[in-house]
Image: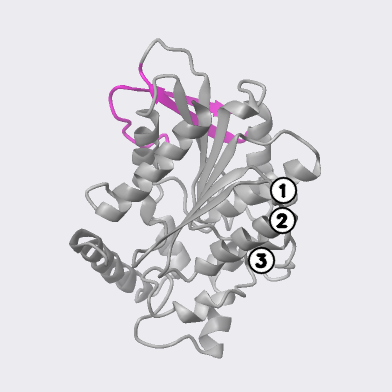
Amino acid sequence: MVSFMGTTRSLIIKTAMKKMKNKDIPFADSLAKFNEKPTEHKFKKGYKITFKKTQNKSRYLIIQKDTSEIIKKVVIFIHGGFYIMGLTSAHYDFAYTLCNLKNDLAVVLVDYSLAPEFAYPTQINEVMDIWKELITLYKPENIVLCSESAGSNCSLVLLQKLANEKKALPKAAIFISPMTDYTLSGESYSKNYQKDIFFGNSNEPLTDESFEKLKNSEIYTYYLGKDIDRKDPSVSPLFGNFTIFPKSLFIVSNNEMLLNDTLNVVTKIKKENKDTNVECYVQEGMYHSYVLGSTWIPECKLAQDKLKSYILENLY
């Protein structure tokens, strides 16, 4: 049963999403208004912030506690938002929370370029570029890759590319409500259409017409365009190879249209890679990427505690 706080938060989000979708501008453009660029964010006291660019101009920032301790461990976080929405206050707050785990732990926030101005495969190339720079500074076994939604799409593609090139992988990976299948083939797209408060519609079931409208809406085409093969593993990592894959934790809600994006990829990893330990935590009744919510919501706190314990278990 969902907590009172969880139910209340869901109702607030549902109301806000309904207002956004009723506006004359595309939903994707409304999402972009939540962006909070690193140069605009008012960082909390007690943290050291370092803005970085690779030689190829890929942007990221390092957040760590303001102590004299040398950084030895790193969590790389790749945010979601359909590659349209940039970093938001929720992502910065999440980074602070992870920094508080240990004094020698830093969080790297990837600040990738945004669609539609920068479309596929720009973001994947930038993340690979940042990864290559970071492993010159930190050993892969001292890195956990963490991501949510479209960011998890990007991190899954990154891991498959590294595996294909026989390159070192991070010690472990965490995926929050991942987007793994741009063909939208999972049954949860229709099954949860009236339950998903972000991307669904509680007033009507998903029809063939509304499915095609969703599939070809700006939240997908701003990134992909209209001529990309959606079964390409660099677009939909569900269709890629998982014979080499790191220890992983997947977190999702059973109300998400993206539920099968998680369940199907977890099933495939377990089938193709018997040696990899893969955990999948499915929360009842919550919303997309709920893990990033405030810890006064019991379900969010439970998931964040699980995620933080997973980081500590693998890095310390």
Residue type (three-letter) at the residue carrying disc 2: Ser
Residue 43's place in the image compared with 224, above or below, is: above
The answer to whether residue 236 of the structure is visible from this angle is: no
Q: Where residue 234 is drawn, which disc sits there?
A: 2
Q: CA distance from mark 2 to mark 3?
A: 14 Å
- At 31% from the left and 33% from the top, the residue drawn is 42
Label drawn at residue 276:
none
| Horizontal relation, residue 129 to residue 307: left or right | right
Q: Residue furthest right?
A: 165
* Left or right for 25, reference 44: right
What residue sits right under mark 3 in the picture? 225
Under circle 1, the secondary element is helix
Residue lying furthest left: 4
Q: Is disc 2 placed on a helix, strand or loop?
A: loop
Q: Residues within 10 Å of mark 2 (few under 14, many from 20)?
A: many
Question: How is the protein colored in the picture?
Answer: one colour
Q: Position of residue 94 (x, y in %)?
A: 37, 41
Pointer 1 and pointer 2: residues touching (CB < 8 Å)? yes
Q: Secondary structure at mark 3?
A: loop
Residue 67 is a magenta residue: no
Quadrant of residue 201 within the rendered picture: bottom left
